[in-house]
Amino acid sequence: MAETHFTILDTQLVQCTLVACGTLLIYDLLCTLDQEVKYVWQTPWSPGKLLFFLNRYLPFIDTFLSLHLKLVVSSPEKCLAHYTVVAWFIVIGIIISEIVLLLRTYALWERKRSILIILCVSGAVTYIPAIVITNLELRSLKYVPTTRPGCQVGTASSIIIFAYILLMLSETVIVVLTVIRARQYLRHSTSPWVVQLYQDGMLFYAYLLSMSIANILVPILAPRIFANWLATPQRVLHSVLCNRVLLLILRQRSSANMTTRIPRGDEANQSAIFTSFIDDEVSANLTFTTPTVGSTAVSSTYVATSSNMATLSQSLQVRSHDTSYVDV
């Protein structure tokens, strides 16, 4: 009787959760589609744009496939095959979202080599074991026949808990680096959009951290049939929140209050999603050194702000043959 009660509860609870996740995806798409058309569709193709679309639309596949599995009666073989597809979509989707956040953190730190090393190590320590752990969990899954809609798990390993722990640690590294950078940057700028960028980052981390903790505790404290109950909500939250961050950056980039940095080397060909910007309230000291005449070189310092950066950039391009510059 108790097992039947848990089966009914699992069916109803997971179905409602998946419906809520699908509703959230559709609602977020409708709320931000105008921004996507304006700030994403009209930009040239780039790795950043590709990551945005993968992060945006892949969740629809695994979320509604999961919902389909909970609404129809399926054989154990079909359950295993479909859940395998869903599991890998979830893992790959979360990794894509995390890569976007890692690259954004890297850009906030102005692409410093030390930060790149930290983020690469954090990503490798998280993603490679997560893939191995997911494969081990899928091999342990055994479904049993049922006459009710959905799939009934017979046996399964709890090893997936360690993947959520690693994910939580990776997100903690990102938020610590973001907090450190915010303390350094906000001393010199009170720009509303920059403050919002960092505040949203902290708030999103709180949401994702609470979801990771729940995914760790549920398999330990609840019956085994609820072990993957919150996997899809975490995946959907990653997608929605990450897209909000990217749209905020792209929206501000296109506004009149933002001026891009003068590109150096190959920066001009890189995606703007992962490029640092100069805010309208931050000035930069540019030092110019004219060609040496005899043994004398003339240098001068120019204070560049958003109001004169466009003119300065044109001037530098016109006189690039006899002027060198460094932007700080």
Image: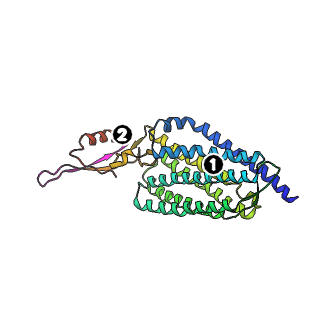
Does 317 sit left or right of 260 as displayed? left
Q: Is residue 201 visible?
A: no
- Which amino acid, by three-letter code, is at mark 1? Val
Within 10 Å of disc 2 (Cα), the crowding (few <14, some 14-19, many 20+) is few
Residue 166 image point, x, y percent: 59, 63
The reply, left or right, for residue 256 in relation to residue 199 is left
- The magenta segment is 290-306
Q: Residue at x 56, y 58 (%)?
A: 171
Above or below: residue 75 compared with residue 26: below
Quarter of the image for the N terminus: give it. Answer: bottom right
Q: Position of residue 101 (x, y in %)?
A: 52, 53
Q: Is residue 300 magenta?
A: yes
Q: Residues within 10 Å of mark 1 (few under 14, many from 20)?
A: many
Pointer 1: what residue? 236
* Residue 223 in view, yes or no: yes
Q: Looking at the image, which is closer to me, 141 or 63?
A: 141
User: Is disc 2 in contact with disc 1, using a CB cutoff of under 8 Å?
Assistant: no
Residue at horizontal 50 percent and vertical 49 percent from the top: 195
Q: Position of residue 327 (x, y in %)?
A: 32, 50
Amino acid type indicated by mark 2: Ser
From the viewer's side, name the closer residue of 257 and 89.
Answer: 89
Q: Of callouts 2 and 1, which one flags the residue occurring earlier in the amino acid sequence?
A: 1
The disc placed on residue 307 is 2
Q: CA distance from mark 2 to mark 1?
A: 40 Å
Name the residue at 58% across, 53% down. 92
In the rendered structure, find residue 92 and report the number of the disc placed on it: none
- Please tell me whether mark 2 sits on a helix, a strand or a loop: helix
| Left or right position of 293 against 324 | left
The residue closer to the viewer here, 235 or 296, is: 235
Residue 123 percent coordinates (x, y): 52, 60
Q: Residue at x 78, y 50 (%)?
A: 11
